[in-house]
Image (cartoon, grey):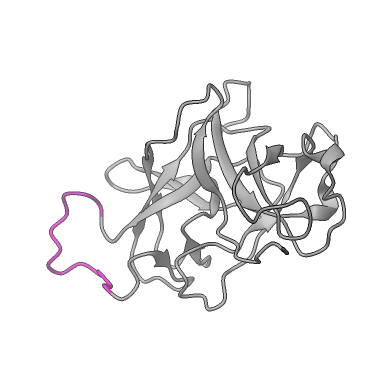
């Protein structure tokens, strides 16, 4: 049976020591009118910005960026803020519009040892058993329709290789029914490089 094409971005499932992912995340800030639509499962990177409360800023990451983590939640306002008078939009609670008129806060799974699942692309290039430990970059994509809460970001199949500078590493096929090696396969993966990995890196 062919795999289903149903991308969801990155979906945290556990940690390298085998423990499950239990929803841990930290709060980050998206400035108003940031120019990027952001969805659950999107990958973000640090930005030279912060809000008046001292919450650090993030932006949508490009496919080859070193990332801060994966968006697992979106808050309409800063926690503790009175809803009255805020730019709360109850029709868009699960994604950030590219033209959002107010600051938005995201919950980001930012642990360097995070294990997540992600779908690959349509072309079966490099989707073979001998490459299931290879590294890769991302293809960043917005869902259709854009009001879908889940990211459409996937593995860039053409980049799957042993190259050590690629930012993500596959950990094999996600073990579930109806998921076989080939187009649209879902793989387990980890960060090959990460902003908080402990390695010396230039700050934003």
Residue 108 vs residue 124: left or right? left
Q: Residue at x 46, y 75 (%)?
A: 147
Residue 119 vs residue 124: left or right? left
Q: Give, as a single range, the part of the protein colored magenta.
A: 78-90
Q: How many marks?
A: 0
| Residue 204 seen anywhere in this rendered image of the structure | no
| Residue 19 seen anywhere in this rendered image of the structure | yes
Q: Residue at x 66, y 53 (%)?
A: 179
Q: Residue at x 62, y 50 (%)?
A: 118
Taking depth in this image into account, of 129 and 86 the one nearest to the observer is 129
Q: Residue at x 17, y 54 (%)?
A: 81
Residue 17 in the image: state x and y as whole percent: 53, 21
Residue 49 vs residue 138: left or right? left
Image quadrant where residue 131 sits = top right
Q: Main secondary structure of the magenta part?
A: loop
Classify the position of the N terminus by image quarter.
Answer: bottom right
Residue 165 in the image: state x and y as whole percent: 79, 35
């Amino acid at each position: 049976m062919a795999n289903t094409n149903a991308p969801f971005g990155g979906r945290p499932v556990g940690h390298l020591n085998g423990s499950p992912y239990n929803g841990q995340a930290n709060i980050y800030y998206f400035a108003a009118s940031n120019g990027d639509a952001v969805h659950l499962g999107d990958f973000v990177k640090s930005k030279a910005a912060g809000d008046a409360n001292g919450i650090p800023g993030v932006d949508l990451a490009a496919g080859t960026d070193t990332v801060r983590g994966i968006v697992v939640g979106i808050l309409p306002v800063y926690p503790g803020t009175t809803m009255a008078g805020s730019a709360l939009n109850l029709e868009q609670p699960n994604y950030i519009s590219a033209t959002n008129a107010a600051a938005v806060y995201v919950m980001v799974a930012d642990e360097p040892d995070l294990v997540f699942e992600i779908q690959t692309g349509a072309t079966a290039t490099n989707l073979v058993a001998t490459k299931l430990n290879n590294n890769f970059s991302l293809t960043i994509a917005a869902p259709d329709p854009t009001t879908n809460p889940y990211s459409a970001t996937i593995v860039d199949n053409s980049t799957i290789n042993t190259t050590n500078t690629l930012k993500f590493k596959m950990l094999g096929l996600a073990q579930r029914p109806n998921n076989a090696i080939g187009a649209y396969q879902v793989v387990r993966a980890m960060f090959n490089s990460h902003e908080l990995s402990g390695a010396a890196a230039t700050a934003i």
